[in-house]
Image: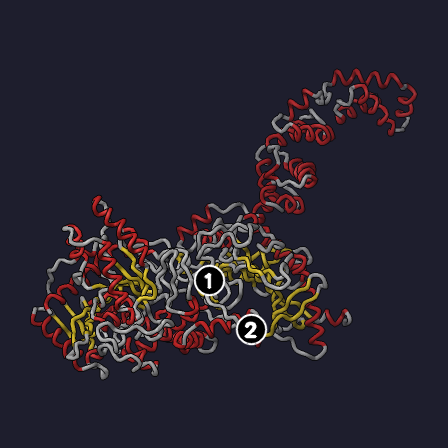
Amino acid sequence: MLKEEVYEKYELVVGLEIHVQLQTKSKAYSSDSAEYGSAPNTHISAISLGHPGTLPRFNENTLQYGVRLGLSCGSEITYENQFARKNYFYADLPKGYQITQDKTPLCLGGSILIKDDQGKDKRIGITRIHMEEDSGKSIHDLDPFNTLVDLNRAGVPLLEIVSEPEIRTPQEAYNYLTEVRQLVRYLEICDGNMEEGSMRCDANVSVRLKGAKEFGQRTETKNLNSIRNVFRAIEYEFKRQIEVIEAGSEIKMETMGFDAVKGTTSSMRSKELAHDYRYFPEPDLQAVYVDSDYIEKVRKDLPALPSELIKKFTSEMNLSTYDAEVLTEEKYFALYFDELTRLTKNYKAAANWMMGAVKSYLNENALTIQEFKIKPDQIAEIIQLIDEGKISNSIANQKIFPYLIEHTNDRPRAIAESNNWIQESDSNALEGFISEAIAMYPEKVEAYRAGNKNLLGLFMGEVMKRSKGKADPKLTSQLLKEKLEN
Amino acid sequence: MKNYQCLKEIQADIQSGQISCKTLVLNYIEKIEENSGLNIFLEVFKDEALESAQKIDQKIKAGNAGKLAGMVISLKDNICYKGHKVSASSKIIEGFESLFSATVVERLIQEDAIIIGRTNCDEFAMGSSNENSAFGIVKNPISSNKVPGGSSGGSAASVAAGMCLASLGSDTGGSIRQPASFCGNIGLKPTYGRVSRHGLIAYASSFDQIGTFANSIEDTAALLEIMSGPDEYDSTLSQKKPNSYTDDIVQEVSSKKIAYLSCYVNHEGLNPEVKEKTLAIIENLKQKGHQVDEINFDYLEQLVPAYYVLTTAEASSNLARYDGVHFGYRSPQAFDLLSTYVKSRSEGFGKEVKRRIMLGTYVLSAGYYDAYYSKAQKIRRLIKERTQEILKDYDFVLSPTTPHPAFDIGSQNEDPIKMYLEDIFTVQANLVGLPAISLPLGITKEKLPFGIQLMGSPFEEGKLLNFSQYLININ
């Protein structure tokens, strides 16, 4: 450990490579199922097995998903897409090479908007996004003597998103990954599950003295299976590299592994052992051309993105940035809210319902909004009942909403009526209760008039009691004040 | 049995009751067994072929047999046939059974062709003499101390020896045309992208093409017609609908423009008898009113090197899958992942295959890529442009198929460079992707056959086949 001010002399430079596994039905270059979680080696035709005589068949969905992501990041889409072979030997790579893109990545440039550590907007540039196929899985911990290989994943389509080295803190890396995950989920191209490996991240980390123009030597950390671990690995690597430099040594170009239990990185292989992948054009696949018609077609079908929804919710609906962010965390939650705001103009109330009752109900029951049985028009009706003064917030939350959960086909207005939950806002009826309440406590009336305004609560309680809780509190309080003060 | 030269003859004799498919198959099997010393077949699908023959005989009687009923075919041992062994004549996948049939095999069987067995070839189609097979050399049936050519040596020999009517081979740099030349039959390499490669064990993907050996242009056309055309399993295929090639053989030929490359005809290694015959054919064509011109071609010296850099690069990657892990040979001495790779591959592959994997790995390696691979790609493009330019002005390019007729077994296999130069006239068609055919028009005083090659424009196999028939007729 060095002194805090020593670490502070240095700046962290991070670029992330993210692999997202695409949720296509079939694999990138065969018609085998790409489904996750099946019994090992069940989705393996001769193509996945790399048998002699097999040829890859391109899955057009890979391209479509890639273009979706590229357009959402503002990338330039490449017209002529060639495929390349990346050659290396490994037990879970049946062909001995991976089909990927080398010189003509599908997307170039673009960026992802994140928050920096101060909460300010910052754009992280995208270098490239390219299409490739996944390898199989080597399982080292199931059999004490052998490594087992599952080839279900072999050939599942991936997109690799390479960022510019513009990330400066572990928190920015965390935020960047969170944004990317949210984006691929919104686009419905990947489930973004890092624990299951459908989203994977390698971190290229280097340090340099603050103000220096040149980048330092970088290391690449692999095996990061959660966003939290990306944060931890970068934080550790930052300190480790500074300590190496301060001790007078040099950073070596190495591939590091992260030990999530110890929270440390350690060298997996050095540059001398680095692969020479011998990239060359894949002769078994023709180039795929992406013309402007195709791009426009994909663009037309793009869903609303979180950034667009946040903008809409804040500027058109006057919600706070915080509310907008909470509402857009998950795509279908945001879309539910969006639909709700088409049915009520009380956006603030709509937002509160979503972030309050709806969200806590979903959380408590571990449900997604897609599994939520109550429709936006029913929530809108509740809001309208409140706005009309027919029911109070507490009746709505404590009575109507729970009732609706049990009877999802019922209408809130009918529920309120049949359960006698419509509050008393008829001023004639109210005035009767008020007169009775005032007549009960003549000395309290005197005390109130003498200045003890707290006594209003006593009269309110009496009116509520008489109305069996249905008196509209706002109206009651207003009428009471008029009566007491005259 | 008659020595049938084409399907029409067979079908006529079946119709007139002189022969049945079953007898035909039995006769071929007898021929194969009598001449097993030539080592042409690696496996004969005896029972199965007889069974299909009987079924097809029934279909013929019922009048619902396919177009190829009566056609008995052998397959080069690098073409997959579901439920059958396929080994590319290599120890590394000896005993491997294919899970699927090549598209071409499926299409031929659909038309009632009978597959009689798989033929020996150079290991992974790498060779020009069939001396590189892990299962022994093939002897040329015309003269058994000669090589049959390669790599599809067994296929060419099976047709030449009358063991079947036709055979499928693959041609990466001349592997159909050269053995056809040495064995005296017709060998066609179609345009790259004409015939599906699905089910062909890859050597060099951007060069490989399945083609045919036959004794008649008609049969060649009939086979091509059935094999060609789009296939969802091969995305490098042309989407162009194939012609009905048999209808393209019209026997009538208008005046054509034919080019011959001076560097080919004047090549120092060219056998005098081959040269003489080539020039005689040229003279004959001129006399028949065709325009035949000598054309310059500046890339002779680059053809073979560019071909070997690019094909070995692709091969080094295509052959990476034979690693002892998922299928095929695994060294009994392997004790971990690395030794599985090193020992299985060292022991499983033959010498020539290892040489080409090493060469291909080298030319793709960091630091050498630009000097070899990129440069060879550039040369390929230049050769393509120049050849297309020639074919804009000319209908065909004519040349000898090989510099000389079949050579003695064992006479050339110590010098790989010399062996690589066997392909000097044939690699151009593969580098460019053109259709090319070897026609058995020559015969030496020693009674050894040799071929004349015609190269045409892409996807103009119909025109090429029709002119080939004409050339055979006038010789």
Q: Secondary structure at mark 1?
A: strand
Three-letter code, disc 2: Ala
Residue B89 position, x and y percent, is 37, 69
Q: Is residue B407 visible?
A: yes
Chain designation of label 1 = A
Q: Nearer the viewer, residue B313 or A213?
A: B313
Task: Please identify the quarter of the rendering in which residue A333 is found.
Answer: top right
Task: Please identify the quarter of the rendering in which residue A393 is found.
Answer: top right
Q: Residues within 10 Å of mark 2 (few under 14, many from 20)?
A: few
- In this image, A112 relative to B289: left or right? right
Q: Residues within 10 Å of mark 1 (few under 14, many from 20)?
A: many
Three-letter code, disc 1: Ile
Q: CA distance from mark 2 to mark 1?
A: 19 Å
Q: Secondary structure at mark 2?
A: loop
Q: Is residue A219 above or below residue A122?
A: below
Residue A57 position, x and y percent, is 41, 56
Report the quarter where the N terminus of chain A lies. Answer: bottom right
* Label at residue A99: 1
**Residue drawn at (37%, 67%) of the image:** B88
- In this image, B185 relative to B93: left or right? left
Report the quarter where the C terminus of chain A lies. Answer: top right
Residues at discs 2 and 1 both on one chain: yes
Residue that numbered label 2 is attached to: A274
Q: Nearer the viewer, residue A277 or A32?
A: A32
Chain designation of label 2 = A
Residue B230 position, x and y percent, is 31, 54
Q: Is residue B377 visible?
A: no
